[in-house]
Amino acid sequence: NYVLFWHRRDLRIEDNIGLYHALNSGKKVIPLFIFDSDILEKLPKDDARVTFIYEELEKINTTLQSHDASILVKHGKPLEVLEEIIGKHEISAVYTNHDYEPYAIARDKEVGELLASKNIEFKTYKDQVIFERNEVVKADGDPYIIYTPYSKKWLDKLTKNDYTSVDCASYYKNYAKKSFNFPSLKDIGFTASSIKVLPYTMAENMIDNYEDTRNFPAIEGTSRLSPHLRFGTISVRKCVQNGLQSENNVFLKELVWREFFMQILWHFPKSVTNNFKSKYDGIKWRNDEDEYKAWCEGKTGYPLVDAGMRELNESGYMHNRVRMITASFLCKHLLIDWKWGEAYFAKKLLDFDLAQNVGNWQWVAGTGCDSSPYFRIFNPTSQIKKFDKDHTYINKWASDYQELTYPSPIVEHKFARERCLSTYKSGIES
Ligand code: FAD
């Protein structure tokens, strides 16, 4: 008689809440990961995120093997895979961690029903965030839709218990001593990508200097935590512990932005496909396909926009400052619907996370809950003077920008700015 621990967005066996409870359940634990065929079939065959997940599972498996255990890695529809496992092994409970995306909520509901019909417990835990769902809400119980009061409440509520790590390693002996066959990437229909997730840093000086360095894309001044938080190769509790070591909480507050958008998605799942504020529904996006293509390829003729898009295409990452500039350029200079930009980032970002991507895109477009005002239009040229004055970042990603063959600006800034203001204005008034 066993319990299953189902890894999803938590690809680690350290400081993992659901896993900790499974290992302390009194039953031997079979760890499981399912490559969900419904998700995988929409991705290119060399998707870098699939390679990353695969390599992280390999690392987990190596550690487990040193404890005479192994991880069960399956490929298929979660419901069918779980049904098959339950038929094969005697399972009394399935443990896992909460996932707040609409697809995952629907999946887990079905899984819960299947397990209940077989008298198997489905035990799920908060692990991905410090505060989830309704844990940080207004006095009247309504969700916050403005970041500043949310972050204040979040910080006031935080106690040591909320970010204390759990010790899983002491209980590895409670893994089932089983040796499962580990599939190859090819077995699940994929090939390895050359685009890699970089390691994160939480060095003390990075966090201390963060406020001064984080806006400069040429400086390695940010943590590179985002894909690790997305796939759970680090626990958020560790990040908060590190954040608290600094005298200022600028870095910590970025982790709070992440949780802010997580709870927005949970409370307002419609914001994935709709403007958070419906008064913007009347905006007449131009949605010019050729201009969209130029933006995707980093050929707008604006060097900082192009450098950003090429960084994204070549590395699966883009610096936050440049994300804001490229996104603003798409929505405001080109008047292309933020959903098009969101979709492109979703395809390319190693750290793509629905809550963060939608939340930030709506923020930039001005349509979101706590948005940048629509009349704030980044000037893609003066941003260079402020944030990349030596052109170090531009030279790295768009080194051709000084050549004669470099495209001329796709649209003139002043003209685009006026067009944007009048289009938004008439959209709101319509
Ligand atoms: P750091 O600056 O070191 O920040 C530490 C952590 O705080 C990040 O890893 C992240 O978890 C969180 N954080 C920082 N900034 C934000 C923010 N603006 N919103 C929410 N959380 C934040 N981030 C994603 O993780 N996934 C996305 O799909 C995503 N899409 C974005 C789309 C647009 C248009 C914009 C403007 C931003 C987007 N971001 C997204 C937020 C941000 O750009 C990245 O989290 C950050 O650049 C990652 O680099 P880092 O880990 O070095 O960040």
Image: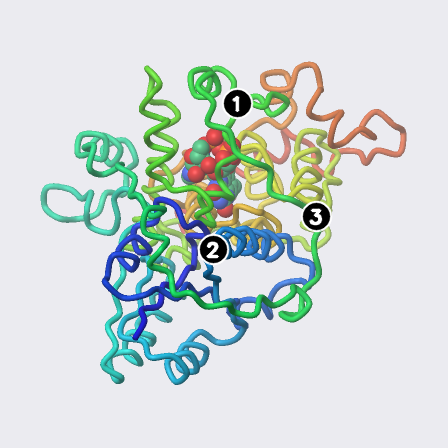
Residue 175 point in image, percent of width and height: 37, 60
Task: Inspect the image, locate mark 3, and give the three-letter code of the amino acid beneath it.
Answer: Glu
Left or right relative to 426: residue 318: right
Question: From the viewer's perspective, is residue 56 above or below residue 76?
Answer: above
- Quick one: label 2 or label 3, which is nearer the N terminus? 2
Is there any visible trace of residue 425 in the rendered image? no
Front: mark 3 or 1 = 1
Using the numbered discs, state the Cα–Cα distance from disc 2 to disc 3 in whole angstroms.
Answer: 50 Å
Label 3 element class: helix
Disc 1 marks which residue? 215
Which residue occupies 31% across, 43% down?
A: 167
Task: Inspect the image, locate mark 1, and give the three-letter code of the amino acid beneath it.
Answer: Asn
- Quick one: label 1 or label 2, which is nearer the N terminus? 2
Disc 3 marks which residue? 291
- 69, 240: nearer the viewer: 69
For the N terminus, which image quadrant? bottom left
Mark 2 neighbour class, 10 Å CA radius: few under 14, some 14 to 19, many 20 or more: many
Front: mark 1 or 2 = 2
Question: From the viewer's perspective, is residue 392 above or below residue 116?
Answer: above
Judged from this view, the residue extending furthest toward the right is: 404
- Quick one: label 3 or label 1, which is nearer the N terminus? 1
Image mark for residue 64: 2
- Location of residue 311 (image quadrant): top right
Judged from this view, the residue extending furthest toward the left is: 140
Residue 56 point in image, percent of width and height: 54, 51
Front: mark 2 or 3 = 2
Using the numbered discs, state the Cα–Cα distance from disc 1 to disc 2 in whole angstroms.
Answer: 40 Å
